[in-house]
Image (tube, rainbow, N blue to C red):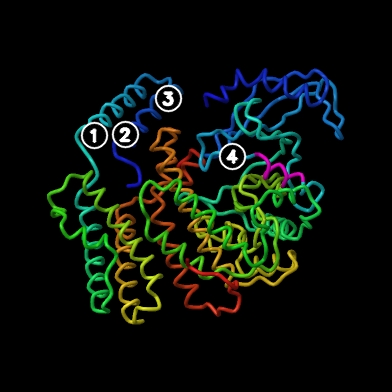
Amino acid sequence: MNNSFPRLIDGMCATLRREVLTRLDDEFARGQVFGVINLLNTFKVRANWSAGFLLQQIEAQQRALEGAAAAAQRASLSAPSATRMNKADPGAGAMSIEALLERRDANNREIGTWLEWLDAKSVELPAGAAQTIEQLLRAAMRAEIDLELKNSPRPLFAEMSSGREE
Amino acid sequence: MSAIGDETTLRPKIAAYLEREVGHPVEVGPIRRFAVGFSWLTFSVPVSHIEIPGEGGKGEQTRDLILRLGPDYGLFAPYSAMPEMLAMRSLEGSAVPVPRAYWGGDDESIFGAPFLFCEKVEGDAVVPWVSAGEPQLEEGYRKRLAEQFIDALGALHRVPWREKPIAELERGAAEAITVENAARHNVEHWEAQIARWAMRPYPLAEWGIRWLKANCPVAPRVAIVHGDYRTGNFLEKGGDITAILDWELVHLGDPHEDLGWVSLPMYKGGTPYIGRLAEPEWFYRRYGEQAGYTVDMESVRYYQAFSLLKLAATHMAAARCFEEGRFNDMRMPAMGSQIATCLKQMEKTIDAAGATKSGKHRATGASAS
């Protein structure tokens, strides 16, 4: 999910037209490729990334950010300002995919701010609080990565580099 | 490709350039682009009647040259041909097999991009990736390649580079590379690449950068670092390595950096061997003997973590190049889908390195700031 859904569809259609059809002589096979292009274009207007996938990532982020803010408060330190701003946001469940992607990225920026804050406050923060906050942030970062991996097929690098399927 | 043109428009430009360089007429045949790489474009250029200084060979015989062009739309563009050319010239006559570099430069008025002409070397690439069910390399062949692969890396890292053309990389640099600052320089370089190419924030990458900055090792020496030394980037013919290729990431630094990169799990091809070729313990022992220093496994682990960050950065750049329409190559978003894999592996490597770290080699003044 590092590329946008419509761009991937456009790229696939362009590759099929320019790189596959130009090298394919068989009439039936060419017809099949046009069928695939037709379906890809249908997906482009009807489908998008999964909201469920993003909601799980955002939930993990929110949990970590709220926990980090609470831990900072317990240590009598004010949290990075971005955390307080996010509390007024509408619920993620009602948001569009684009808004969810934006939210995920905003939360990730905020986690980055927290990492910076942890370094800056390393002297002031009690060791236990620093460790708690770091663990919370890392749990969110790990959850994002794990969800991506769980939803990724086995890469076909051997096939992509050789052009063959053993 | 607009500034560069296609194979047909390149051909007369190549002939004109070569004629200026060698001082006599040459004939350039149909050129062919290799479908490899995501950054530099590589062409095979058949040239007749060419006499290359120091090589002779003028006559009717046609010889193939390799032309590399660094387009402004590739991964991590803009490029310079100078590091690769200086490295290849520095290694001429050494125990590192490299193609001979003939001409090159960054003047885009000639071909529309930085360029490099070099010798075409015979051989095939052994790829690091294997598909399910694909047989592994035959034992004798694997070991023979492994020995040469290790010895070439050891030889590279003991090149007295200060006496070679590559020393030019130091001139004009804001700060000379030292055993103390080599790691920090590298981390800062890739941090800047991530800032430039990532399409969204990756806090795990930021966390990794902080760890890398706070744990910089001291290098055993400053050496020529290939930067992409792995299976897939050498040619072999009949079990002999004929050339180490792809020098575009060459720089001066800690030789452990190449050890970290070559030993990445992504290049093991489903085997326990470094680069599908060598048992790790034997690899490090033989390499250390060849390079003339004792390999520090803490530094290797540090550079494995660094290499995973660098690989993640490469995938981030691939995703952006595709998203911006610089390429339609579908392998690029496929690479982009591997960012999570690299970052996950990086985190595990850092956790393991942190658990075993003695702290004895940390560079003074290194900090996470």
Cα–Cα gap, marks 3 and 4:
27 Å
Cα–Cα gap, marks 3 and 2:
14 Å
User: Do the dots labelled 3 and 4 sit on one chain?
Assistant: no
Q: Nearer the viewer, mark 4 or mark 1?
A: 4
User: Do the dots labelled 4 and 1 sit on one chain?
Assistant: no
Left or right of residue B281, residue A20 in this image:
left
The residue that mark 2 highlights is A9
Report in which chain the residue with disc 3 lies. A
Cα–Cα gap, marks 2 and 1:
8 Å
Cα–Cα gap, marks 1 and 3:
20 Å
Left or right of residue B364, residue B293 in this image:
right
Q: Residue at x 31, y 76 (%)?
A: A132
Q: Residue at x 65, y 57 (%)?
A: B175
The residue that mark 1 highlights is A43
Q: Which mark is residue B79?
A: 4
Figure quadrant of residue B237: top right
Q: Residue at x 34, y 56 (%)?
A: A149
Camera-side residue of B225 and B190: B190
The residue that mark 3 highlights is A18
Report in which chain the residue with disc 2 lies. A
The answer to the question of whether label 2 and label 1 lie on touching residues, with beta carbons closer than 8 A, is: yes
Report in which chain the residue with disc 1 lies. A
Cα–Cα gap, marks 4 and 2:
30 Å
Q: Nearer the viewer, mark 4 or mark 2?
A: 4
In the rendering, at what x and y percent does residue A4 appear? 31, 40
